[in-house]
Image (cartoon, coloured by chain):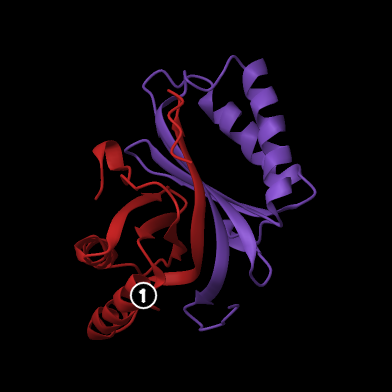
Chain colours: A red, B purple
Amino acid sequence: MSGAGGFARTPKPPYYAVIFTSHLSEADAGYAAMGETMFALALAQPCCLGAETARGDDRLGITVSYWADEASILAWKAEAQHVAAQKHGIARWYDHYELRVARVERAYSGPEGRDLG
Amino acid sequence: MSGAGGFARTPKPPYYAVIFTSHLSEADAGYAAMGETMFALALAQPCCLGAETARGDDRLGITVSYWADEASILAWKAEAQHVAAQKHGIARWYDHYELRVARVERAYSGPEGRDLG
Protein backbone atom coordinates (compact mmCIF):
# COMPACT_ATOMS: atom_id res chain seq x y z
CA MET A 1 0.00 0.00 0.00
CA SER A 2 1.06 3.56 -0.49
CA GLY A 3 0.74 5.65 2.63
CA ALA A 4 0.40 9.36 3.23
CA GLY A 5 2.52 11.79 1.28
CA GLY A 6 3.69 9.30 -1.32
CA PHE A 7 5.47 6.95 1.07
CA ALA A 8 5.07 3.18 0.85
CA ARG A 9 3.92 1.57 4.09
CA THR A 10 6.22 -1.41 4.08
CA PRO A 11 6.37 -4.14 6.74
CA LYS A 12 9.35 -5.09 8.83
CA PRO A 13 12.21 -6.39 6.63
CA PRO A 14 13.12 -8.55 4.88
CA TYR A 15 11.29 -7.76 1.65
CA TYR A 16 12.35 -6.80 -1.87
CA ALA A 17 12.79 -3.51 -3.70
CA VAL A 18 12.90 -2.83 -7.43
CA ILE A 19 14.82 0.41 -7.99
CA PHE A 20 14.08 1.89 -11.42
CA THR A 21 16.14 4.96 -12.35
CA SER A 22 15.30 6.47 -15.73
CA HIS A 23 15.97 9.48 -17.91
CA LEU A 24 13.14 10.59 -20.15
CA SER A 25 13.89 11.19 -23.77
CA GLU A 26 12.86 14.45 -25.41
CA ALA A 27 10.22 12.56 -27.38
CA ASP A 28 8.28 11.56 -24.30
CA ALA A 29 4.78 12.23 -25.59
CA GLY A 30 2.46 9.85 -23.83
CA TYR A 31 4.91 9.09 -21.03
CA ALA A 32 2.75 10.44 -18.25
CA ALA A 33 -0.05 8.03 -19.12
CA MET A 34 2.41 5.16 -19.56
CA GLY A 35 4.16 5.91 -16.28
CA GLU A 36 0.88 6.06 -14.43
CA THR A 37 -0.19 2.79 -16.03
CA MET A 38 2.98 0.99 -14.96
CA PHE A 39 2.87 2.48 -11.46
CA ALA A 40 -0.78 1.46 -11.04
CA LEU A 41 0.01 -1.97 -12.46
CA ALA A 42 2.63 -2.53 -9.76
CA LEU A 43 0.35 -1.33 -6.96
CA ALA A 44 -2.46 -3.59 -8.22
CA GLN A 45 -0.34 -6.73 -7.84
CA PRO A 46 -1.36 -8.81 -4.79
CA CYS A 47 2.16 -8.95 -3.40
CA CYS A 48 3.21 -5.36 -4.08
CA LEU A 49 3.83 -3.72 -0.72
CA GLY A 50 3.85 -0.19 -2.11
CA ALA A 51 5.83 2.16 -4.33
CA GLU A 52 7.45 5.58 -4.25
CA THR A 53 8.31 7.80 -7.21
CA ALA A 54 10.00 11.13 -7.91
CA ARG A 55 11.13 12.91 -11.08
CA GLY A 56 12.93 16.23 -11.23
CA ASP A 57 13.14 18.98 -13.81
CA ASP A 58 16.26 17.34 -15.27
CA ARG A 59 14.04 14.46 -16.47
CA LEU A 60 15.80 11.97 -14.19
CA GLY A 61 13.33 9.89 -12.20
CA ILE A 62 13.50 7.18 -9.56
CA THR A 63 10.66 4.77 -8.83
CA VAL A 64 11.05 2.16 -6.11
CA SER A 65 8.45 -0.59 -5.77
CA TYR A 66 8.46 -2.97 -2.81
CA TRP A 67 7.57 -6.66 -2.94
CA ALA A 68 7.02 -9.53 -0.57
CA ASP A 69 9.21 -11.93 -2.53
CA GLU A 70 11.06 -12.44 -5.78
CA ALA A 71 8.33 -14.57 -7.34
CA SER A 72 6.00 -11.55 -7.14
CA ILE A 73 8.56 -9.41 -8.95
CA LEU A 74 8.87 -11.93 -11.76
CA ALA A 75 5.08 -12.11 -12.16
CA TRP A 76 4.87 -8.33 -12.30
CA LYS A 77 7.79 -8.17 -14.76
CA ALA A 78 5.99 -10.51 -17.14
CA GLU A 79 2.81 -8.45 -16.97
CA ALA A 80 4.68 -5.15 -17.30
CA GLN A 81 6.54 -6.39 -20.38
CA HIS A 82 3.25 -7.50 -21.89
CA VAL A 83 1.71 -4.07 -21.32
CA ALA A 84 4.84 -2.33 -22.60
CA ALA A 85 4.78 -4.42 -25.76
CA GLN A 86 1.16 -3.45 -26.32
CA LYS A 87 2.23 0.16 -25.99
CA HIS A 88 4.97 -0.34 -28.61
CA GLY A 89 7.83 -0.69 -26.19
CA ILE A 90 9.48 1.64 -23.75
CA ALA A 91 12.53 2.63 -25.79
CA ARG A 92 10.69 5.70 -27.09
CA TRP A 93 10.24 7.05 -23.58
CA TYR A 94 13.67 6.54 -22.09
CA ASP A 95 17.13 7.60 -23.16
CA HIS A 96 18.43 5.21 -20.54
CA TYR A 97 17.36 3.31 -17.48
CA GLU A 98 18.86 1.17 -14.73
CA LEU A 99 16.79 -1.45 -12.95
CA ARG A 100 18.09 -3.04 -9.77
CA VAL A 101 16.48 -5.77 -7.70
CA ALA A 102 17.49 -5.66 -4.04
CA ARG A 103 16.63 -7.37 -0.76
CA VAL A 104 15.77 -4.83 1.94
CA GLU A 105 17.47 -5.85 5.16
CA ARG A 106 16.95 -2.87 7.47
CA ALA A 107 14.58 0.10 7.51
CA TYR A 108 14.24 3.27 9.59
CA SER A 109 11.77 6.13 9.66
CA GLY A 110 12.29 9.68 10.75
CA PRO A 111 12.75 12.31 11.84
CA GLU A 112 10.73 11.06 14.81
CA GLY A 113 13.06 8.11 15.19
CA ARG A 114 10.74 5.17 14.67
CA ASP A 115 12.83 2.09 13.91
CA LEU A 116 11.45 -0.65 11.68
CA GLY A 117 14.74 -2.55 11.46
CA MET B 1 31.27 7.06 -9.49
CA SER B 2 28.31 8.89 -10.98
CA GLY B 3 28.08 8.41 -14.71
CA ALA B 4 26.44 10.41 -17.47
CA GLY B 5 23.01 11.86 -16.97
CA GLY B 6 22.86 11.35 -13.24
CA PHE B 7 23.17 7.56 -13.28
CA ALA B 8 25.47 5.70 -10.92
CA ARG B 9 27.96 3.44 -12.68
CA THR B 10 27.70 0.44 -10.42
CA PRO B 11 29.61 -2.84 -10.79
CA LYS B 12 28.13 -6.27 -11.22
CA PRO B 13 26.05 -7.26 -8.15
CA PRO B 14 26.12 -7.97 -5.31
CA TYR B 15 26.52 -4.58 -3.66
CA TYR B 16 24.41 -2.47 -1.30
CA ALA B 17 21.89 0.32 -1.78
CA VAL B 18 20.67 2.92 0.71
CA ILE B 19 17.23 4.10 -0.41
CA PHE B 20 16.33 7.44 1.19
CA THR B 21 12.79 8.67 0.48
CA SER B 22 11.96 12.05 2.02
CA HIS B 23 9.34 14.75 2.01
CA LEU B 24 10.58 18.29 2.48
CA SER B 25 8.89 20.43 5.07
CA GLU B 26 7.64 23.87 4.16
CA ALA B 27 10.42 25.38 6.25
CA ASP B 28 13.16 23.99 4.06
CA ALA B 29 15.41 27.05 3.95
CA GLY B 30 18.94 25.85 3.51
CA TYR B 31 17.92 22.40 2.35
CA ALA B 32 19.50 22.69 -1.07
CA ALA B 33 22.92 23.32 0.46
CA MET B 34 22.39 20.57 3.04
CA GLY B 35 21.23 18.09 0.43
CA GLU B 36 24.21 18.83 -1.76
CA THR B 37 26.52 18.47 1.23
CA MET B 38 25.14 15.04 2.14
CA PHE B 39 25.14 13.87 -1.49
CA ALA B 40 28.76 15.01 -1.93
CA LEU B 41 29.67 13.41 1.39
CA ALA B 42 28.40 10.04 0.19
CA LEU B 43 30.19 10.29 -3.14
CA ALA B 44 33.43 11.24 -1.39
CA GLN B 45 33.49 8.03 0.65
CA PRO B 46 36.08 5.54 -0.65
CA CYS B 47 33.56 2.70 -0.91
CA CYS B 48 30.63 4.65 -2.35
CA LEU B 49 29.91 3.25 -5.79
CA GLY B 50 27.70 6.15 -6.85
CA ALA B 51 24.37 7.79 -6.14
CA GLU B 52 21.20 8.88 -7.93
CA THR B 53 18.70 11.49 -6.82
CA ALA B 54 15.36 12.95 -7.93
CA ARG B 55 12.82 15.29 -6.34
CA GLY B 56 9.53 16.36 -7.86
CA ASP B 57 7.34 19.40 -7.47
CA ASP B 58 5.38 17.62 -4.71
CA ARG B 59 8.50 17.85 -2.49
CA LEU B 60 8.89 14.06 -2.40
CA GLY B 61 12.44 13.01 -3.18
CA ILE B 62 14.31 9.74 -3.55
CA THR B 63 18.09 9.43 -3.25
CA VAL B 64 19.75 6.05 -3.69
CA SER B 65 23.41 5.63 -2.84
CA TYR B 66 25.32 2.46 -3.68
CA TRP B 67 28.01 0.86 -1.55
CA ALA B 68 30.51 -1.97 -1.75
CA ASP B 69 29.62 -3.39 1.65
CA GLU B 70 27.72 -2.73 4.86
CA ALA B 71 30.78 -1.56 6.77
CA SER B 72 31.08 1.35 4.32
CA ILE B 73 27.47 2.30 4.95
CA LEU B 74 28.01 2.36 8.70
CA ALA B 75 31.11 4.54 8.33
CA TRP B 76 29.20 6.96 6.13
CA LYS B 77 26.23 6.95 8.52
CA ALA B 78 28.48 8.00 11.39
CA GLU B 79 29.99 10.81 9.36
CA ALA B 80 26.62 11.94 8.00
CA GLN B 81 25.13 12.06 11.50
CA HIS B 82 28.11 14.11 12.65
CA VAL B 83 27.63 16.61 9.84
CA ALA B 84 23.86 16.71 10.39
CA ALA B 85 24.41 17.42 14.09
CA GLN B 86 26.72 20.28 13.17
CA LYS B 87 23.96 21.63 10.97
CA HIS B 88 21.46 21.44 13.85
CA GLY B 89 19.78 18.23 12.80
CA ILE B 90 17.68 17.21 9.87
CA ALA B 91 14.24 17.36 11.46
CA ARG B 92 13.81 20.94 10.26
CA TRP B 93 14.16 19.87 6.64
CA TYR B 94 11.95 16.82 6.52
CA ASP B 95 8.33 16.19 7.41
CA HIS B 96 9.10 12.51 7.12
CA TYR B 97 11.64 10.14 5.66
CA GLU B 98 12.13 6.42 5.17
CA LEU B 99 15.61 4.93 4.94
CA ARG B 100 16.08 1.37 3.72
CA VAL B 101 19.29 -0.60 3.42
CA ALA B 102 19.17 -3.28 0.74
CA ARG B 103 21.45 -5.79 -0.92
CA VAL B 104 21.34 -5.45 -4.71
CA GLU B 105 21.18 -8.89 -6.24
CA ARG B 106 20.45 -8.26 -9.93
CA ALA B 107 20.79 -5.26 -12.24
CA TYR B 108 19.79 -4.47 -15.81
CA SER B 109 20.27 -1.50 -18.12
CA GLY B 110 18.14 -0.36 -21.00
CA PRO B 111 16.54 0.27 -23.32
CA GLU B 112 19.47 -1.12 -25.30
CA GLY B 113 19.23 -4.38 -23.38
CA ARG B 114 22.62 -4.54 -21.67
CA ASP B 115 22.43 -7.00 -18.80
CA LEU B 116 24.62 -6.53 -15.73
CA GLY B 117 22.95 -9.28 -13.73
Q: Residue at x 71, y 57 (%)?
A: B68
The 10 Å Cα crowd at callout 1, few under 14, some 14 to 19, many 20 or more, is few
Residue B41 makes an appearance in the image: no
Local secondary structure at mark 1: helix
Q: Residue at x 43, y 39 (%)?
A: A116
Q: Residue at x 70, y 31 (%)?
A: B78
Residue B38, image quadrant: top right
- B78 sits to left or right of A26: right
Residue B21, image quadrant: top left
> Chain for mark 1?
A
Residue A7 makes an appearance in the image: yes
Question: Label 1 belongs to which residue?
Answer: A71
Q: Residue at x 43, y 61 (%)?
A: A16
Spot occupied by residue B59 in the image (x, y as percentages of width and height): 37, 35
- B32 sits to left or right of A4: right
Q: How many marks?
A: 1
Amino acid type, residue under disc 1 in the picture: Ala
- B117 sits to left or right of A27: right
Residue A9, image quadrant: top left
- Residue nearest the observer in this picture, B3 or A110: A110
Q: Is residue A68 above or below residue B48?
A: below
Spot occupied by residue A95 in the image (x, y as percentages of width and height): 47, 71
